[in-house]
Amino acid sequence: MTVVFGAAARLSWPPGAEGGDVRISERLGIGLWVGGPALGYLLLAAYPCWRWHGLFRLPLPWLWLAIPGAVLLVSGLGLYAWSLVTVVRAWQAGALARTGPYALVRHPAYAAWILLILPGVALLSGAWPMSLAPVLAFYGFCRRVEREEAAVRAHFGEDYESYCRAVPGRLAPRRPACRSADDSIAARDVTKSS
C-alpha cells in the first residue's frame, strides 16, 4: 500500500506547485503510519498462523470465510485504486479531491485498507490473529489523522472546511448535519426579500 501510494504521490505532485520541495513522507500523509504497522503485523503473524494453523484456525468452514473474504478484498482493491486515480488527478490539477470516493468519505484509501482489504485478508487466511491487522491500522489512523487533516486544511483553507462540512465521515459515509427548521425559514425569508 505505502509503496504504491508513495509512487503515486511522487509522480503526481504538480511540478512547480506550492510545497513542491516537500519531503515524500509529508506528501504521503499518514499512509506509512496506517499501513506500516498493519502490514508488518500481517507478515509477522503469517508464519505462526501457517505453522500452527490448527491452533489459530477460525472455527468455520473455509468456504464460509473465503467468499466474504474475497468479496471484501476485491471491493477494497477497487476502492483503493479508484481513490488513487481520483487523488492523483486532483493533485495534478492542484485541487482538493472532492469527487468519486472522496464525495462519500474524506479518507477512502484508508477506508479501503481498514474496512475492506485487511479484513478480507484476515478472512481468507482463516486464522483469527490476522483479524488484529485492521485494528492496528485503525489505531494508526486515529493517532495520525488530525495531523494529516491539519496539513490539508493549511494548504486549502476554507475550501477544505466546506468539504469537511459536506463530507463529515472520515472512514464511513455519514450524512451532513441537517439545518434546523429555523435556518431553513430564515434562508427562505432572505431569498424572498432579495
Image: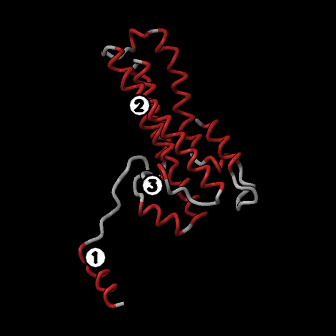
Query: Where is mark 1, residue-wise?
Result: 184
Q: Which mark is residue 58?
A: none
Instruction: Tell me the residue at 39%/20% (across/down).
Output: 66
Indicate which disc, 3 or 1, sits on the residue closer to the N terminus: 3
Query: Where is mark 2, residue-wise?
Result: 72
What secondary structure is marked by label 1?
Answer: helix
Contact between marks 2 and 3 (CB within 8 A): the answer is no
Question: Amino acid under label 1?
Answer: Ser
- Give residue 25's position: percent from left, percent from top: 66, 46
Q: Counting other residues with Cα less than 10 Å from the Cα at mark 3, is it few (<14), some (14-19), or many (20 or more)? A: some
What secondary structure is marked by label 2?
Answer: helix
Question: Amino acid under label 3?
Answer: Ala
Indicate which disc, 2 or 3, sits on the residue closer to the N terminus: 2
Query: Which quadrant holds the N terminus?
Result: top right
Contact between marks 2 and 1 (CB within 8 A): the answer is no
Question: Is 159 placed left or right of 126 in the picture?
Answer: right
- Give residue 91's position: percent from left, percent from top: 63, 54
Residue 134 appears in the figure: no
Instruction: Tell me the residue at 45%/42% (across/down).
Output: 111
Question: Amino acid under label 2?
Answer: Leu
- Give residue 83's position: percent from left, percent from top: 53, 45
Residue 90 appears in the figure: yes
Q: Is residue 54 above or below residue 93?
A: above
